[in-house]
Amino acid sequence: MKRAIKNEMSLSFPSKSCNEAFARSAVAAFVMNLDPTISELSDIKTAVSEAVTNCIVHGYRRSSGTIYIKGRITDDNKVTLKIRDKGCGIEDVKKAMEPLYTSAPEEERAGLGFAVMQSFCDKVRVKSAVGKGTTVTLEKMISSNDD
Amino acid sequence: MLKTDYKNNTLTAYIEGEIDHDSAVKIRTQVDGAAQSLRPRLLCLDFSNVSFMDSSGVGLVMGRYRQMKLLGGSLRVINIPDRLYRIFAMSGLEGLGVLR
Ligand SMILES: Nc1ncnc2c1ncn2[C@@H]1O[C@H](COP(=O)(O)OP(=O)(O)OP(=O)(O)O)[C@@H](O)[C@H]1O
Ligand SMILES: [Mg+2]
């Protein structure tokens, strides 16, 4: 069934590491009027932080560029977030998503970003093309507290 | 500025606020600076006042674990708030015995 859209937003900002905190706070503010639980909100903030950090440290590795976030809330209280970069892309998405795999161990990366997104959201999709960029789609249902 | 104290060969660093890739870089520089000059036998990272953490926090702890090994000491992470534990549980850090 196609769900009616309750709200939408879009954001874009440069790939500076100070924008990691900005992005997760902005998304939290967007989700806020669904009245999420503290743990739902913290799950979303953590997953967004992972996806945005990946755009900065991997996608735009030695360059810089713009990060795009599109958010949507449908009437079933589902939040969908698309986080996109136009960076280097991922050659092997399946391998990249394996827990503990990282292409940057020397930078003290743990290889847990995708595993965290998967465990903190209901659904994670990754679309990537080498040389073109990466889009991560996160979906999470928010339990409605409005009773 | 990072709050630290040093007694009985133990350097304790009180980490505050949010740990992400941005702040981890700053925390790392300060903790490693203190550890290199004091050469403690034990480095304690106190997480009581950490309000948010993503996988960069795991990278920060793993990096300090290696750093302390190089300096001939050991590492302990103490007072980890329950809600942050989930990410640590996904890492291999539990097996290293550094989480308290
Ligand atoms: N936006 C992206 N652009 C290019 N490569 C990416 C992107 N996101 C992830 N990757 C690749 O996928 C790998 C795994 O990502 P993941 O977030 O799981 O771990 P990590 O970023 O290496 O470590 P951590 O997230 O724990 O700091 C990365 O090491 C990188 O090679
Ligand atoms: Mg990552």
Image (spheres, grey):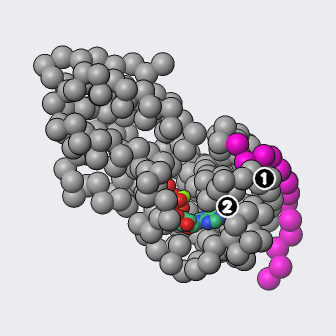
B43 lies above or below A70: above
Which quarter of the picture shows residue B15? top left
* Magenta region, residue range: A1-16
Q: Report the side of A118 relative to B61 (left or right).
A: right
Identify the residue under disc 2. Answer: A59
Q: Is there CB contact under 8 Å for labels 1 and 2?
A: yes
Magenta span: predominant SS is strand
Q: Residue at x 46, y 74 (%)?
A: A98
Whether the magenta-drawn stretch holds residue B79 is answered as no
Residue B7: x and y in percent read 18, 17
If the picture is divided into quarters, which one holds ligand 2? bottom right
Q: Which residue is drawn at 80% across and 53% down?
A: A66
Determine whether the residue tagged by mark 1 lies in a helix, strand or loop.
loop
Residue B97: x and y in percent read 19, 50
Neighbourhood count class around disc 2 (C-alpha, 10 Å): few under 14, some 14–19, many 20 upward: many
Identify the residue under disc 1. Answer: A65
- What chain is tagged by disc 2? A
